[in-house]
Every structure is written in C-alpha cells, then in structure tokens.
Amino acid sequence: MKKLENKLEQNKVRPTAMRLLVLKALQNQKAAVSLQDLEMTFEKADRVTLYRTLKTFQDKGLVHSIEDGTGATKYALCQDGCECAPEDMHVHFFCNSCNDTFCLPKLKIPSVSLPQGFIPVETNLLVKGICANCS
Amino acid sequence: MKKLENKLEQNKVRPTAMRLLVLKALQNQKAAVSLQDLEMTFEKADRVTLYRTLKTFQDKGLVHSIEDGTGATKYALCQDGCECAPEDMHVHFFCNSCNDTFCLPKLKIPSVSLPQGFIPVETNLLVKGICANCS
DNA sequence: CATTAAGTTGCAATGAGATTGCGTTTTTAT
DNA sequence: ATAAAAACGCAATCTCATTGCAACTTAATG
C-alpha cells in the first residue's frame, strides 16, 4: 500500500482512501476501463467521485483517457515514460470481439507529413480489429 | 440538381427532397459538420430526420463519420475513391483554433506493425493542431 | 489541542448527444 | 388506382458527461 501512496504523492495527488482504492483497481486491469467499468468493481461507490478521481489522475498525469469509438471514455494508467501529453501518444487498440481497449505503449505513432500550413500538436491513432486474446 | 439525384441513385439511396437538400448542404461545407451544424443550415428541419438521413448516407457509402474528440460526431462527404470502409481511412485534422475538422484525403494512414496476435481491421488517425486557415 | 481554511466526497440535478417508437405522409410497385 | 414499402416528423427515452452544493475530511496554524 505504501507504493500506491508514494505514486500518488509523486504526482502531487493527496492519497485519500478513495484514491488509493481507485489506483489499486486501475492497476488490476488488463484493459482500459470506462467509468462504468470502474464503478462496477466497487461494492459501493459514487459515480461522480470516481469521475472526479479519474479527472484528477488525468490532470496529474497518472492516467490518460482514450476515445475508442464506443461513446464511453476509457481510462488507463500511464506506464513509465508514457507520453500522454502534450506530445504524440502511443497507439490504442480496440478489439471488435471482446470490446476491450488496450494501450500499445511500445508503438509510437508514425509522423505524417501534413499539407502546407497545418501544424500538428497532438496525434491519436486508434486501431480496431481482433486482439491477441481473441485471435 | 440532376447530378445530385444521380449521386444518390448511384449509391442506391432514394432521392427524396430532403435527401437532396442534405446532400447539397454537405457539398457546400469546407469542413466536416455535426448534426447540429447541419440542422442550423436549414430554416426548418427535424433533427431526427437529418440524423437518419446521415445514417443512411453513411450506410450507403456517401458520407463517413469522424470522431474528433469534441463529443459530437462529424460527417463529411466521401471523395472519389474514399476508402471509408472496411479498410484504412485517410487522416482527419481537428483545428484547436477554429474547431473545424477536415479530411485530408491525400494522406494515407501509415501502417503500424502490431504485436503478435493483433489483427488490424480498421485504423483511425486524428491529428489535432492548427489548420492552414488559422496558422 | 482547537480552530480555520482548503480540499474531497456524496447526492441531486442538469445538459448534450444519440437513438427509438409510432402514427402520418410520401413514394414505389402492381 | 391501390396496396405495400419507405421516409418523415414529433415525442420520448437513454447513456454518458458534468455541475452545484452541502456535509465531511484533511492539512495547516496559532
């Protein structure tokens, strides 16, 4: 538990009981989780508190959010050296079979040469298909 | 107007009055439009009808939809040779300044080599930054 | 240790966008 | 001309995101 506390403090997030539980829950996930996913891993938890906890984590660089086209924002813990912001991020993969969304941190997004006048700031690459577990 | 009718018929969409108006409106746009954008280009139009028209157009390959992170789905007419589905698509660009979303049909998404077992079906690449008009 | 300020949580409520049900109208086919 | 099929318009619903506010907890200060 000390490790979790340290992680929060390193990111300037106060280690409250709730936040420790959320952080622990996030570490147990193999795929990115939606707010609803997260809510269901707790017996009793307020959706809004979880929502704000995730927002805080995101602001402080503990997690990043992913739009996978399902409509629900997914969240995943940042790995060591996760380049969430403001630069390009890693690739995300959405499995059409199990509907899980994965970070592929090893893969960097290839840079694209934009037309004259377009200045890139941030790039998101989402690949959809069949994941390793389902194929 | 004949051209518009032909375009609809070529895509096996019945050329109703409403659909012709929507198609014409879409052709007048320089950027992708949301449902709300589209609604505002008409004096009087039912949101649901426009929604279903866009869905139909999308199903028949006349338009493709874009998730640009704003929360509202954007729609854009497919260009000649637009590879909406099921293969990789072209790049989309969201301008942080004017909030417009553009198709960059000339740019093909570079293929990424996924880890063992991951099978790609569809790829979406969204670049955010400053567009040519705003820079 | 007591007090106060700041930050956090829980509950209710709201907002935006997407989507469906269904009766009416329009179009197509016979 | 008429029946069947498709499209439309209106109301309603659903999901997810987000805010307001009061109660509670934590941190800091005297």
Image (cartoon, coloured by chain):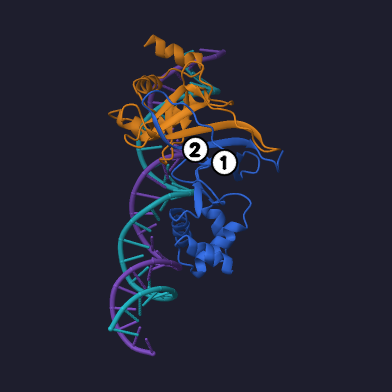
Chain colours: A blue, B orange, C purple, D cyan
Residue B101 or residue A35, whichever sits in front? B101
Three-letter code, disc 2: Asn
The percent coordinates of residue A83 (x first, y second) are: 50, 45
Nearest the viewer among B64 and A23 is A23
**In the rendered view, does D19 fall on the left or right side of A107?**
left
Q: Position of residue A79 (x, y in %)?
A: 57, 51
Q: Mark 2 = which residue?
A: A124
Subunit bearing disc 1: A
Query: Which quadrant of the rendered structure holds the N terminus of chain B?
Result: top left
Please name the amino acid that badge 1 sits on: His
First in sequence: mark 2 or mark 1? 1
- Side of B55 where D29 appears, left or right: left
Vertical position of residue B4 compared to residue A131: above or below? above
Residue B102 shows in this picture: yes
Q: Check disc 1 and report the residue beneath it.
A: A92
Is A2 rendered above or below residue B33?
A: below
Q: CA distance from mark 2 to mark 1?
A: 8 Å
For image coordinates 60% across by 58% down, the residue present is A27
Regarding mark 2 in the picture, which secondary structure is present there?
Answer: strand
Crowd rating for badge 1 (residues with CA inside 10 Å; few <14, some 14–19, many 20+): many
**Which quadrant is home to the C terminus of chain B?**
top left
Could you classify mark 2 by the number of other residues whose Cα lies within 10 Å: few (under 14), some (14-19), or many (20 or more)? many
Q: Residue at x 45, y 29 (%)?
A: B92
